[in-house]
Image (cartoon, rainbow, N blue to C red):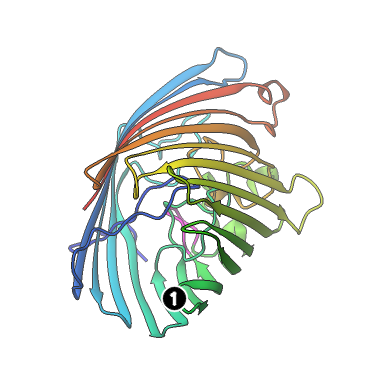
Amino acid sequence: MNRRVLLLACAGATVGAGAQEPAPVYQTQQTNIRFHVDALLRQEWTKDIFVPGAETRDEDRRRLRLLPRLEFGGDRFTLGAGGDFNLSSDKNLDPRPMLLRDNYDSRDARVDLAFLRFEPIRWLRVEGGRFEMPVRLTEMIWDRDLRPQGGAVTLTHHDAAGVGRFGVTGLYARGSHVFEDDDVKMLLVSGQATFQGQGDSNLQLIASYVGWDDVNGLETMIRRQNTRPEGRLVRDYRVVDLQARVRTAFDPPFQIVADYCWNTALGEDNRGLWLAAVIGSLVKARARVEYTYSRVDADATLAAYATDDFFWATGWEGHRGEIASSAGGRSSFHLIGQLQRFKDSPRPEEREHWVKRLRVELRFSY
């Protein structure tokens, strides 16, 4: 697929944090054609980046991102297409020392979504093409900027009120990255169970298996922090991921997320932990405060597909705090601070060196 084709009709997806609630849909009536545009304006500063044998360096950049999406369909099927338009002050494809690649091209106009979703009966959903990740993985495993390209089937059992309580999803994909990965195959099987408490409180448990094959089909620049002698990935990635999400009905609402993963193909450097706590909401309230702690070993998961917001994809430990407020329901302001270290760096002197990041974001959804 040529991912640099400028679309005539495009679509968008929400940029969100690992424990953030799903974005609201701003729609007042049922229609057959739906058009959405999400936008992101970001200014970020990264301080004290480690430089071997020299003083540390600082970097800052600005980013504009537009994600328009057009959907056609009804209750039984949806046909969708979308685009991803990026303009950033950096040039992250230019070769230079110490550059860590992000999951986007800083000068890009590409296909983001192109899918068909079919729901012939209430308990069955089938989707194919390039679509949003149907499993609620945290960013430790899957960056929300990426879309699986392939097919997925989801079976769901609903209770008497029509709410899905138990479900299982199977997904097969290849060529799912922004950059070249057409030979990389991904198989995901996930089951989830939701237990309702009083009011809106609930407990959700999610267990997933994610396996990747032909991983050296990844473009060299996004092989990143996994073990890679002479640039080649020499280890297998068969990842089991276990999540628990607790949401309370307090005012303001409160949510806790605990995610633990391990790469079952290895006996060392194979664990990951992601913990998050959220107070408030941008859907039911005007403000939200979020804290995330994570520690991810170098080969806990395939680094190319994990979050890029923490500067490294694997082999790191870090903290993230976020304060967010909404204005009118369709726009929000986010102040995000991060502190992280490359704990599995091949350079011993870097392993205790902490890098600081600050981001200011404006997000819009129409």
Quadrant location of residue 149? bottom left
Spot the residue most to the front: 198
Q: Secondary structure at mark 1?
A: loop
Instruction: Please state, as top left, top right, bottom left or bottom right, where the N terminus lies in the image.
Output: bottom left
By secondary structure, the bulk of the magenta-drawn segment is best described as loop
Residue at image mark 1: 161
- Would residue 67 be counted in the magenta stretch? no
Q: Which residues are magenta?
A: 175-181
Q: Position of residue 283 (x, y in %)?
A: 34, 50
Residue ID at (57%, 54%): 245
Vertical order, 208 against 284 (above or below):
below
The residue drawn where x is 60% and y is 22% is 354
- Decide if residue 327 is on the left or right side of residue 227: left
Q: Quadrant of residue 34?
A: bottom left
Residue extending furthest bottom? 120
Near mark 1 (Cα within 10 A), the count class, few <14, some 14-19 or many ≥20, is few
x, y percentage for residue 8?
17, 63
Along the line of sight, the residue nearer the viewer: 248 or 15: 248
Please give left or right for residue 353 compared with residue 39 in the image. right
Occupied quadrant, residue 125: bottom left
Q: Residue at x 62, y 15 (%)?
A: 53
In the picture provided, is 310 more to the left or to the right than 225?
left
Question: Residue at coordinates 61% horizontally, 20% vertically from top-left?
Answer: 52
User: Foreground: 345 or 5?
Assistant: 345
Q: Nearer the viewer, residue 257 or 280?
A: 280
Image check: 131 left or right of 164? left
- Identity of the amino acid at label 1? Ala
Number of numbered markers: 1
Q: Position of residue 342 (x, y in %)?
A: 63, 31
Q: Position of residue 264 (x, y in %)?
A: 75, 58
In the displayed structure, would residue 335 be above or below residue 177?
A: above
